[in-house]
Amino acid sequence: MKRINFLLITVLFFQLAFSKGQVDTISVFSSKMNKEVKSVVIVPENYTNKKHYPVVYLLHGFSDNYAKWLNTVPAIKTLTTDYQMIIVCPDGGYSSWYFDSPVDSTSQYETFITKDLLKYVDTHYATIPDRSSRAITGLSMGGHGALYLAIRNRDLFAHAGSMSGGVDLRTSTKKYDIAKRIGSYKSHHEDWDNRSVINMVTTLKNNELDLIIDCGVSDFFYQINAALHRRLMALNIDHDYIERPGVHNWAYWDNSIRYQLLFFDRCFDKAKK
C-alpha cells in the first residue's frame, strides 16, 4: 500500500511540474496606466529556449479577465503543443475594448499590449520577434480588440482574427460600458466612428493582414459581422469568413478557436517559405 501511495504521489508531482512548465501567470508593468497587469502565457509541452516560436495573442471578452480562456477552454494548452506556438492571454480590463481611452486614463490597453506586453514576452520567452510570426485574435469585445489592434499596428501583427466580435461599436451605444471609454455617442460620435473596426478596414490594402472572421448566425453580433464581410468584399480585401450555426457562448468559441489557430499555423508556415 505504501508503494502504491508513493507512486501516486510521484505521478501527481510530475503532473504538477508539467503543468507549471506549460502555463505561466505573469505580471507586466503598464507604463501608461502605472500599474501591474496580469497575463497568462502558455508554451508547448516540449518548449525549449533553443527553439523560437510564433506567438498568438488571445483576447478575452467583456467582463472577463486574463484567465478566462484557459479556465474555460483548457484544450488550448494541447493546441500550443500541436502547433508549436505560444499563446498569450492578456488582461484587457472589465470593459476596455482594448483601445487607449480618450476619457479614462486608467484604461490604456492598446499601449499596454503593443508596447509593454509584446516587449516583455519577446524578452522573456523564445519567440520569433517579427510581425510575420505574430497573430492576434479574440472573442466578442476581444474580437473587436484584436482587429482594432492589428489594423492600427500593422508593423507588429501580420495575422488577425475575430470570433463573434463587436466590430461596430455604434450598435452598442448604451451597452458594455463603451460610453465610459469613449464618451457618449451624441457628443463623441466621431470617436465612435473612428474606433469601429467596420470603418477602420477602409484603411487596409489587400494582403496587409491575413484575416479570419467567425460568427454564429444566431449571435446578436451576427449582422455586424456579416456587414464587415460585405465591406471587405467590396474593398477587395482577401479574408476567411465563417458563419455557421451558433450563438454568443463558450460552446461556439471552444470550437471556433481550433479553426483560428489552424489558420494562424498555416500563416506562420507560409511566412517561413
Image (cartoon, rainbow, N blue to C red):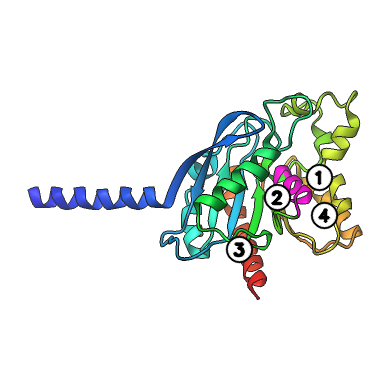
Q: How crowded is mark 1: few (under 14 residues within 10 Å), some or many (20 or more)?
A: many
Looking at the rendered structure, the secondary structure element under dot 3 is: helix
Looking at the rendered structure, the secondary structure element under dot 1 is: helix
Task: State the residue at coordinates (60%, 44%).
Answer: 117
Whether residue 164 is visible: no
User: Which badge, 2 or 4, is on the more N-terminal residue?
Assistant: 2
Seen as rendered, the residue at the extreme bottom is 273
The residue wearing badge 2 is: 162
* C-alpha separation, residue under disc 3 versus residue under disc 2: 14 Å
Looking at the rendered structure, the secondary structure element under dot 4 is: helix
Asked if residue 88 lies left or right of residue 146, the reply is left
Residue type at mark 2 is Ser
The residue wearing badge 3 is: 262
* C-alpha separation, residue under disc 3 versus residue under disc 4: 20 Å
Magenta stretch bounds? 144-154
User: Which badge, 3 or 2, is on the more N-terminal residue?
Assistant: 2
* C-alpha separation, residue under disc 2 versus residue under disc 4: 12 Å
The residue wearing badge 1 is: 197
Q: Does the magenta stretch include residue 8?
A: no
The residue wearing badge 4 is: 229
Asked if residue 43 lies left or right of residue 34, the reply is left
* 261, 41: nearer the viewer: 41
Q: Residues within 10 Å of mark 3 (few under 14, many from 20)?
A: some
Residue type at mark 3 is Leu
